[in-house]
Image (tube, grey):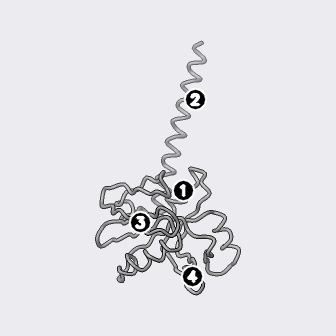
Amino acid sequence: MVYIFNKLFADTQTQLRAGKEVGFRINKNTCRIVDICVNLEEHWLDIAQVGEAGIFQHNQTPLLVIEVTSTNEAEDYKKKHQEYAAIGIPEYWIINRNREHIRVCNSAYPGSPYHHREFRKREQILSQVLPQLKLTVDEVLNPLSVRRLMEIEKAQQVAERDALKMELERLKTLMKLD
């Protein structure tokens, strides 16, 4: 998923970046390590310069946090849900492989409670933070490997290049007819 998000950000020239297993401050003494985090590119650069474990500070609140449920679902659905809303994370996804759904939680403004919607198989996920995202629940629950995604992208580039070559040859032929 990180690859898909970062490709979207590059394609749309959005100054965002996604990463895995990064932390951010809940309060002065507490930090949460999340499965996937989307934040401003400048904040990623800040934590990269520290050279230690990456932790976003209070003024670097992530825009989107994604958690995959583990054995303690109550923590993802209740405790983290409340913590993330309280510190102003605009969007929080809970991926539940057992129930085969994704809960997308959004807050109207920083610090407000989340409202959520659950997306099931074959449904496209709607994100307020990333409205240009085209991703289904199935693609999240059964992701292609990064290698496979890169192979698909390369094949598309080759097909586009071949189509351009054919069009160029067609135009050259037309020019000779004139």
- Sequence-wise first label, 2 or 1: 1
Identity, as a three-letter code, of the amino acid under mark 1: Lys
From the viewer's perspective, is 99 left or right of 164?
A: left
Q: Residue at x 51, y 62 (%)?
A: 3
Q: Position of residue 14 (x, y in %)?
A: 59, 54
Identity, as a three-letter code, of the amino acid under mark 4: Asn
Secondary structure state at the residue bearing disc 4: strand
Q: Cα distance, mark 4 to mark 3? A: 21 Å
- Sequence-wise first label, 4 or 3: 4
Question: Picture quarter containing residue 80?
Answer: bottom left
Q: Is residue 167 above or below residue 133?
A: above
From the viewer's perspective, is 68 left or right of 24?
A: left
- Sequence-wise first label, 3 or 2: 3
Q: Cα distance, mark 3 to mark 2? A: 49 Å
Residue at which label 3 appears: 105
Question: Picture quarter containing residue 140?
Answer: bottom left
Residue at which label 4 appears: 27
Q: Is there a contact, CB below 8 Å, between mark 1 and mark 4? A: no
Identity, as a three-letter code, of the amino acid under mark 3: Cys
Q: Cα distance, mark 1 to mark 3? A: 23 Å
Residue at which label 1 appears: 7
From the viewer's perspective, is 55 left or right of 103?
A: right
Q: Cα distance, mark 2 to mark 1? A: 29 Å
Q: Is there a contact, CB below 8 Å, between mark 4 and mark 2? A: no
Dot 2 alpha-carbon crowd within 10 angstroms: few under 14, some 14 to 19, many 20 or more: few
Q: Residue at x 44, y 63 (%)?
A: 106
Which of label 2 and label 1 is nearer to you? Answer: 1
- Sequence-wise first label, 1 or 4: 1
Q: Is residue 74 above or below residue 147?
A: below
